[in-house]
Image: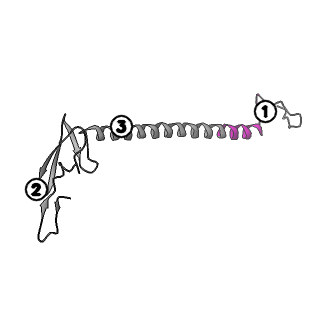
């Protein structure tokens, strides 16, 4: 608010502190000024006018910074796990392909010898 009146004939300052329009948190101290008010917080806190409350000066930045680092850590672990799984799947597929190709030319340890393969005399 700031002022009340019609703007032409009368214009009075609104005492936001006395009318309890702002600066109502327990840590706040209100001082009326011409057309506005000043609100200060005790114990080194910072006043946020939009939400009419006192907060720690560094609490918002620390908590959001911690959230960002936690998100980066989770994404890093997820990416490393996904990459390891991808490498494992590719290795298994390549092993299968190599064994299939080699089985065409020579019997492998876990396959019985087929009698219908052509044996060359040396």
Q: Is residue 20 or residue 70 the one in the foreground?
A: 20
Q: Position of residue 28 (x, y in %)?
A: 20, 41
Q: In which quarter of the image is residue 97?
A: top right
Q: Name the residue under label 3.
A: 66
Describe the element under mark 1 as helix, strand or loop.
Answer: loop
Between the residue at mark 3 and the residue at mark 1, the CA separation in whole angstroms equals 58 Å
Read off the magenta span. 94-109
Q: Do the residues labelled 3 and 2 touch (CB within 8 Å)?
A: no
- 112 left or right, relative to 54: right
Q: Which residue is drawn at 12% across and 71% down?
A: 8
Question: Of the residues under marks 3 and 2, which one precedes in the sequence?
Answer: 2
Which quarter of the rendering shows the N terminus?
bottom left
Describe the element under mark 2 as helix, strand or loop.
Answer: loop
Residue 34 is marked as 2
- 31 left or right, relative to 93: left
Question: Of the residues under marks 1 and 2, which one precedes in the sequence?
Answer: 2
Q: Mark 1 points at which residue?
A: 107
């Amino acid at each position: 608010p700031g002022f009340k009146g019609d703007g032409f004939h009368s214009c009075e300052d609104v005492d936001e502190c006395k009318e309890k329009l702002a600066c109502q948190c327990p840590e706040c101290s209100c001082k009326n000024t011409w057309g506005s008010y000043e609100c200060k917080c005790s114990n080194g806190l910072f006043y946020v006018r939009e939400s009419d409350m006192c907060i720690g000066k560094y609490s918002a930045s620390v908590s959001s910074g911690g959230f960002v680092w936690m998100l980066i850590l989770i994404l890093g672990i997820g990416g490393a796990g996904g990459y390891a799984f991808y490498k494992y799947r590719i290795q298994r597929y390549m092993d299968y392909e190599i064994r299939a190709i080699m089985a065409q030319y020579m019997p492998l340890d876990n396959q019985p010898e087929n009698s219908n393969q052509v044996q060359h005399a040396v």
